[in-house]
Image (tube, rainbow, N blue to C red):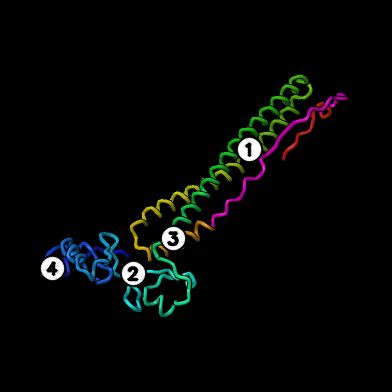
Amino acid sequence: MAQAAASTCEICTAGPGEYYCQQCDQSFCGSCKSSHLRTKSCKNHTFLSGPNINKDEKLLCTEHDEIYFFYCQDCDIPVCRICSVEKHSRHLMTDLTKSTEKLRFEVVKNIEAKVTTSKVNLSKIEKETQTYRDEVKAVIKTITEEGNYWKNLIDKKVDSFVRLLHDEEQKTLQNITALTKVYRGDIENCQQWEKKIKKMETMADVLLIQKLKKLKVDVDNIDLKPVPGRSYVSYRNKSPSGTEVDSLFGEMQFK
C-alpha cells in the first residue's frame, strides 16, 4: 500500500521529505533533491513524490540493486543492465519504457475497438427494433381492419390475435433489452479501464507494465458476440371461403 513521504528530509533533516530517490532509497526535500540531481553520478536518478511514494515496491533489481532498463521478451520480465548480460545475454531484449508504451497502446486500441464495435451493435439494435415495432403496428392495423369488416362474427378472434402478437412483442423486446444492457455494460467497463489507464500515466514503468498486463487480460476476456438476426413478424391475409371465423383469417408468423 502507498505510504506518505518521510516527515523530514534524510539529508538536511530540516525540510519535509517530499521526494523519494529510488536509487538511493532516501527521502529528500525540494532543495536537497535539486542538489542531488546536480551531482554527476546522480543526475539520472529517478524520484517519486506524494501518493506515488511506496518504499515497499521493488523498483530496483533485487539481485544487483540496479534500475530496470530492459524488458526480456523471452522471460517476460524487466531486467537491469547486469542481468541482461549475465542471465539474458541471448534473449530478445527491448527497452522497458518502449515495451510499456507499446503494451499501453495495444490495450488502449483494444478498448477503443471494443467500444466502437459495441456502439455499432447498439445502433443496429435500435434501428432494427424500430423496424420491428413498425411491423408490429402494421400487422395489428391489418388484423384490426379485417376484424372490423367481420365485426359481428370475429371480435373474439381479433382480440386473440392481437393478444398473441403483443405477448410475442413483449418477449422479443425483453430479449432485446437484455442484449442492449450487455453491450452498454461492455462500454461502461471499457470506459472505466480507460480512466484507470489515464491515472496510471505517472506510475513507474516497471509497475505500470504489470498493471497493464493484468488489465489486458480483462480486456481480452470481453467477448463481443455479434448481434443476432432481428425478430421478424408478418401477417398474410387469407381469402375467406366459408362462414367459419378461422377461415376468415390468415396465419401469424414469428421468426
Q: Residue at x 62, y 43 (%)?
A: 175
Residue topped by disc 4: 13
Instruction: Identify residue type, mark 3.
Output: Leu
Instruction: Identify residue type, mark 4.
Output: Thr
Give the mark, 2 or 1, whose residue is nearer the N terminus.
Answer: 2
Q: CA distance from mark 3 to mark 4?
A: 38 Å
Q: Residue at x 41, y 70 (%)?
A: 78
Of circles 3 and 1, the one toward us is: 3
Instruction: Identify residue type, mark 2.
Output: Leu
Near-viewer residue (116 or 171): 116
Q: Which mark is residue 212?
A: 3
Give the mark, 2 or 3, whose residue is nearer the N terminus.
Answer: 2
User: Is 160 left or right of 35, judged from the image as shown?
Assistant: right
Residue topped by disc 1: 170
User: Judging from the image, what secondary structure is the residue with disc 1 in?
Assistant: helix
Of circles 2 and 1, the one toward us is: 2
Q: CA distance from mark 2 to mark 4?
A: 25 Å
Q: CA distance from mark 2 to mark 3?
A: 16 Å
Residue 227 picture location, percent across and down: 62, 45
User: What stretch of residues is rendered in magenta?
Assistant: 221-245
Q: Residues at badges 3 and 1 in contact (C-beta under 8 Å)?
A: no
Instruction: Identify residue type, mark 1.
Output: Gln
Q: Residues at badges 2 and 4 in contact (C-beta under 8 Å)?
A: no
Residue 86 picture location, percent across and down: 41, 80
Q: Which mark is residue 59?
A: 2
